[in-house]
Amino acid sequence: MAKYRHVQTSFWSDARVSEEMTPEDKYFYLYLLTNEHTNQIGVYQITRKQMAFELGYSIESAKALLDRFINHHDLVVYNEETRELCILNWGKYNLNKGGKPIEDCIKKELKSIKDLSLVRLVLERTENILLVQKVSVYAGLDDTSHDTSTIRGQKEKEKEKEKKTPRHKFETCDINGAKYLFEKIKGNNPKQKEPNFNNWANEFRLMRERDNREPQEIKDVIDWCQADPFWQGNILSPKKLREKFDQLTIQMKSKKGAKNNAESSDSNTNRYSQKGEYDYGF
């Protein structure tokens, strides 16, 4: 439980805050940044009922505001199952300084976080590379805990490796995945222009080879995001799908959990290939 939180004065001059947020949005965002449940890492447990009570709102109003920050402002992710809230830009403004006291505090807080994938989302927008590397190790998000290179250096190496890799070294399943995504997008917008399927297929290859995504989870996320009113207008390429994959997965699971309508995977077993065979079954 936090005793106090600093808010930078630049909060009020931030373009997104001053131009895109209503007065109620600003009040709610300040609450999310400074309420007593916050911690040093920007991922904490809170319910809509708590938000409503502490803000003096109805539960319906608190729910509407939270949904607005998730789907419209893209500043928050909420896990319905663990009741944990993630402030995506937390690290950008609150983790710009490191030091042993902060690191010790974060290390302690990580033990109480149930969904560590939310921590990964915070770190993706954190500019303090050294702290990102350390927190990744503390949270078990970095398998190369003995590697002394920075996260930025690792990303640069990955980019160089991708450049050296032939652009169109992909499997048939990657083309199938590209065409499947396009058909879903076209279903929402019949006038959607046909893409370069070779380029799209290469992104599917990267998801499969570099990100270790399974065909089933890729298909499930495509189906869900192209049926979601907000994401169907934002995920219009496999590159964007790959970039937002973790966030999409969290929201998909959260919304399914909230509605208690998650389908059993057993009924779909025969539709997907064994790991490594790469037959999407699209």
Image (cartoon, rainbow, N blue to C red):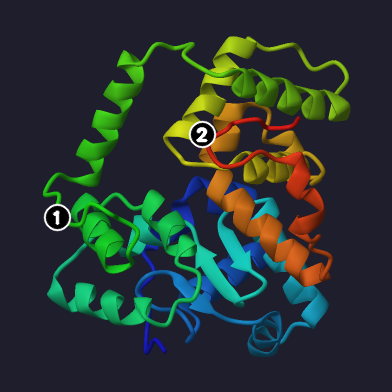
- The CA span between labels 2 and 1 is 26 Å
Which corner quadrant holds the N terminus? bottom left
- Across and down, in percent, residue 52 comes to 71, 84
Task: Check residue 281 in the rendering and tell me which mark sits there, or answer none.
Answer: none
Question: Judging from the image, what secondary structure is the residue with disc 2 in?
Answer: helix
Q: Quadrant of residue 68?
A: bottom right
- Asked if 267 appears above or below 26 in the picture, the reply is above
Q: Going by the image, does 190 lie left or right of 194?
A: right
Task: Check residue 208 in the rendering and tell me which mark sits there, or answer none.
Answer: 2
Viewer-proximal residue, 278 or 195? Answer: 278
- Around disc 1, counting alpha carbons within 10 Å, would you say few (fewer than 14), some (14 to 19), or many (20 or more)? few
- Residue beneath disc 1: 146
Please tell me which residue is depicted at 50% across the width and 82% down the height of the picture: 35
Please tell me which residue is depicted at 45% across the width and 77% down the height of the picture: 113
Q: Amino acid at mark 2?
A: Arg
Please tell me which residue is depicted at 56% across the width and 56% down the height of the picture: 75
Please tell me which residue is depicted at 67% across the width and 26% down the height of the picture: 177
